[in-house]
Image (cartoon, rainbow, N blue to C red):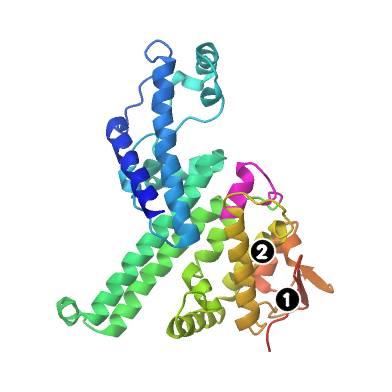
């Protein structure tokens, strides 16, 4: 797969070299100054570039392999969607073009959308389909890259005496107080962005369209943002040494003992993925890997949690008393939010698994 990825990214860089134009160059897109055939060729290049970027992001999401490209390099407009791209001949294209508001293409690249908070918020509230998926997977890759860089700087400062000597306050305590705080602030900022992309509860991964893919990837990403994919695999002992397993067990246990609402929300994400995919006879593309990771998270939770993560601190704030909470069948956002914030005193049920009974 490495050779194929290298070939695709090389082709992608060549296409970008020929298609990159000034960011604010929003020339009128009319039939008079652009032939339909030329427009199709240009848009095909844009589709190719962003398809390769999507593929690179998915390799990190599902295999923890860092992309061979950077979002900073992709400064070409996003491809057209909808009627314009779906036109099958010149006359249809010209007809759709005349109906397009303002007669102009926005010309925004994914890079500009991500780096401009106002543009990003507006786009995420108004768009759907492929663009939302591109934004979501790019946010995850950017967050992962920044966290990796920050943790690397932390490790370097702690382990390298020459670097420590150049700091104003060269103590390990200072470093542990400073950089982790920036990590926390980064995650909080990303949380706000991801909340804008949160699919409605009525949308499930059962769907066969892009909204289904978006929901499935959203639940997957929300799990591996907090629990590293390689850590989940190491817990099973797959391609992991005894030392790797011990480290994974330590890290996962510490995480379980940390922020309880985060643990409960990840459990909800995993339950949603598992219950909506386990009965599928035919899965497509990303679904088997989403199902695997959702099942792995539930298994890890049952193995290493003590049950306190899901219990309500007080009956006053918990969900209304009932024999069992069907975690994967929460119908309203307030039910989900109450579960995340306060937990539930009783049996937690997931379709296809039954009641979640943690190991004593």
Q: Residues within 10 Å of mark 1 (few under 14, many from 20)?
A: some
> Is residue 66 depicted above or below 106 in this figure?
below
Return the residue at label 1. Answer: 356
Residue nearest the observer in this picture, 123 or 61: 61
Q: Residue at x 56, y 28 (%)?
A: 82
Look at the image and give the residue range highlighted in magenta. 202-217
Q: Where is residue 258 shown, x and y percent of the image?
A: 53, 79
**Distance of label 2 from label 1 (alpha carbons):** 20 Å
What is the x, y in percent for residue 32? Answer: 40, 10
Q: Residue furthest toward the right?
A: 323
Which numbered circle lies on residue 337?
2
Residue shown at the point (51%, 70%) measured from the top left: 227
At mark 1, the secondary structure is: loop
Which image quarter: residue 59? Answer: bottom left
Residue for point 46% across, 19% down: 103
Quadrant of the rendered image containing residue 99: top right
Between tags 2 and 1, which lies in front?
A: 1
349 horizontally vs 22: left or right: right
Seen in the picture, residue 271 relative to 317 is either above or below; the reply is above
């Amino acid at each position: 797969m490495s050779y194929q990825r290298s070939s695709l990214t090389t082709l992608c860089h060549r296409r970008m070299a020929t298609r990159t134009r000034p960011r604010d160059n929003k020339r009128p897109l009319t039939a008079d100054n652009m032939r339909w055939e030329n427009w199709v060729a240009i848009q095909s290049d844009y589709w190719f570039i962003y398809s390769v970027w999507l593929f690179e992001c998915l390799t990190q999401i599902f295999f923890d392999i860092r992309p061979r490209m950077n979002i900073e390099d992709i400064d070409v407009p996003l491809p057209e969607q909808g009627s314009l791209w779906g036109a099958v001949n010149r006359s249809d294209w010209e007809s759709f073009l005349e109906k397009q508001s303002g007669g102009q293409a926005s010309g925004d690249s994914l890079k500009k959308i991500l780096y401009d908070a106002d543009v990003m918020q507006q786009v995420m509230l108004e768009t759907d389909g492929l663009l939302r998926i591109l934004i979501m997977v790019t946010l995850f890759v950017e967050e992962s890259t920044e966290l990796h860089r920050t943790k690397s700087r932390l490790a370097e400062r702690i382990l390298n005496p020459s670097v420590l000597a150049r700091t104003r306050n060269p103590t390990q305590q200072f470093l542990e107080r400073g950089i982790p705080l920036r990590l926390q602030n980064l995650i909080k900022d990303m949380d706000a962005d991801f909340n804008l992309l949160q699919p409605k509860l009525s949308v499930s991964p059962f769907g066969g369209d892009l909204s289904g893919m978006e929901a499935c990837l959203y639940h997957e990403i929300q799990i591996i943002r907090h629990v590293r994919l390689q850590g989940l695999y190491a817990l099973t002992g797959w391609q992991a040494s005894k030392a790797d397993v011990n480290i994974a067990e330590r890290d996962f246990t510490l995480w379980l003992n940390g922020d309880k609402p985060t643990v409960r929300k990840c459990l909800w994400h995993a339950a949603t993925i598992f219950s909506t995919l386990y009965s599928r006879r035919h899965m497509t593309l990303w679904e088997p890997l989403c199902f695997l990771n959702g099942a792995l998270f539930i298994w890890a939770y049952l193995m290493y949690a003590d049950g306190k993560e899901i219990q309500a601190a007080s009956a006053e704030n918990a969900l209304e008393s009932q024999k069992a909470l069907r975690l994967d069948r929460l119908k309203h956002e307030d039910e989900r939010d109450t579960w995340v914030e306060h937990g539930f005193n009783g049996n937690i049920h997931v379709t296809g698994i039954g009641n979640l009974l943690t190991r004593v």
